[in-house]
Amino acid sequence: MNNYLSKKIKSLPVSATLEMAAKARELKNKGIDIIGLSLGEPDFNTPDFIKDASIQAIKDNYNSYTPVDGYEELKQAVCEKFKRDNEINYEPNQIVISTGAKQSIANTIQVLVNEGEDVLLVAPYWVSYSAIVTLAGGNPIEIRSDISTDFKISPSKLEKSITKKTKLLIINSPNNPSGSVYSEDELVELSKILDKFPNIFILSDEIYEHINYGIPHFSFAKIPSMYNRTITVNGLAKAFAMTGWRIGYLGAPSWIAKACTKMQGQITSGTNCIAQRATISALKAPVSKIQYMVEEFSERRKLIISLLNDIKGIKINKPMGAFYVFPDISYFFGKTIKNIKINNASDFAIFLLEKAHVATVTGDAFGCPNNIRISYAASREVIVNAIERIKKVLNC
Ligand code: GLU
């Protein structure tokens, strides 16, 4: 029956993050004690004040279709958030609320990218960017970076990657999976290159904005010359522990927001009414209300870095944001451990799953074949246990 499926879906890769999480879940259901560090999902509960707002919304009978681009009150709250946290001025007609930041990204790419146009992705990049670009008929073009530059690119590297076909650049700071954060100066330097190419748009994925350990977050759209061609994407999943609520949003020039609304209107309509009401409360609250989670992530970061630094052959950068480490594990390529030959990062991730019962994600999926991603959005005990298991199977 597979023959009946479209070429498009047959050539689409499965999301590596979700695939690994499903594999881990499957093994857990079979009774195997798997430690899941594959998914970027906070282990905290959604804060009570947000849950209370959703219960109130149910009681208040918020149950009808919502406006395609989101409740007016929520769009207003998003504008206030952008002003308060990012010093960017957006009006409600520049905001679109979606079912997760993933949909905001997909909408943007669908409405901007034509068949055959190039989208620049800084590798390592989040797994779904390239698949979404391909679905839109565009060409995902990788700009490579590595641990020696803290997985960031220089302005000259950006300039060399631009061609006549370049339509969009995706910037993701703090970065998933490397945790790298671009400083304001670094972003301004990149924007000076983009000043020379006025037909290129920029999608700035800022979903990890609040999970930051020291380099102040800077929004690309705050740069005056970039404002009119930047789409700022954010959401509630990571910093508010609301992954399953599926709320993302974007701020963009109004003509792009309007096009995204048109796209969304044909595909999913407005997003969930209860989750939108809860998000109004989440965004209106001071950021200090979620700081306890960031502080805990910061402790876990220190812990996992020190534990991994103890393992021979593992090289890591110091992530300044998000909740992932992205070690280079190429030292193990070509080695046979516990009768398993490790040829690449996928083999290594599968080896860890099968022998240590620790789920991670292969770096190939992020455009970096020498690395694996480990999420430390798990308790300190779980992290210690996971790294002990890894050490044991690697004989360190
Ligand atoms: N963004 C998260 C991750 O990278 C969630 C899974 C996904 O949608 O890729 O793990």
Image (cartoon, helix red, strand yellow):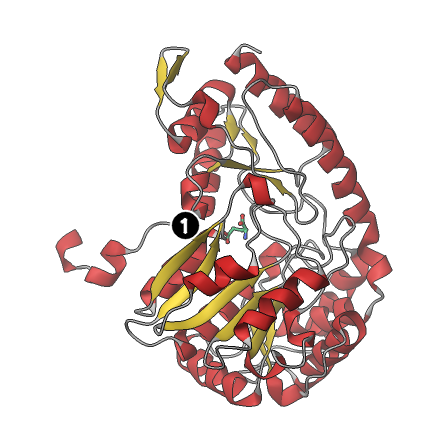
Confirm or reject: label 1 Cβ below 8 Å from ligand 1.
yes
Residue 221 pos. (x, y %):
64, 75
Q: Taking 109 as reference, is 238 above or below it?
A: above
Residue 302 pos. (x, y %):
75, 33
Residue 270 pos. (x, y %):
53, 78
382 relative position to 47: left or right: left
Q: Taking 376 as reference, is 5 above or below it?
A: below
Quadrant hosting residue 110: bottom left
Residue 217 pos. (x, y %):
73, 61
Foreground: 105 or 73?
105
Quadrant hosting residue 319: top right
Position of the C terminus, as image quadrant, is top right
| Residue at (61, 55) in percent of width and height | 243
135 relative position to 254: left or right: left
Q: Amino acid at mark 1?
A: Ser
| Residue at (59, 65) in percent of width and height | 190
Q: Is residue 204 visible?
A: yes
Q: Taking 241 as reference, is 168 above or below it?
A: below
Residue position for label 1:
15
Label 1: which secondary element: loop
Foreground: 117 or 301?
117
Q: Is residue 30 visible?
A: no
| Residue at (72, 78) in percent of width and height | 88
Foreground: 218 or 54?
218
Disc 1 crowd rating (10 Å Cα; few below 14, some 14-19, many 20+) is some
Quadrant hosting residue 162: bottom left
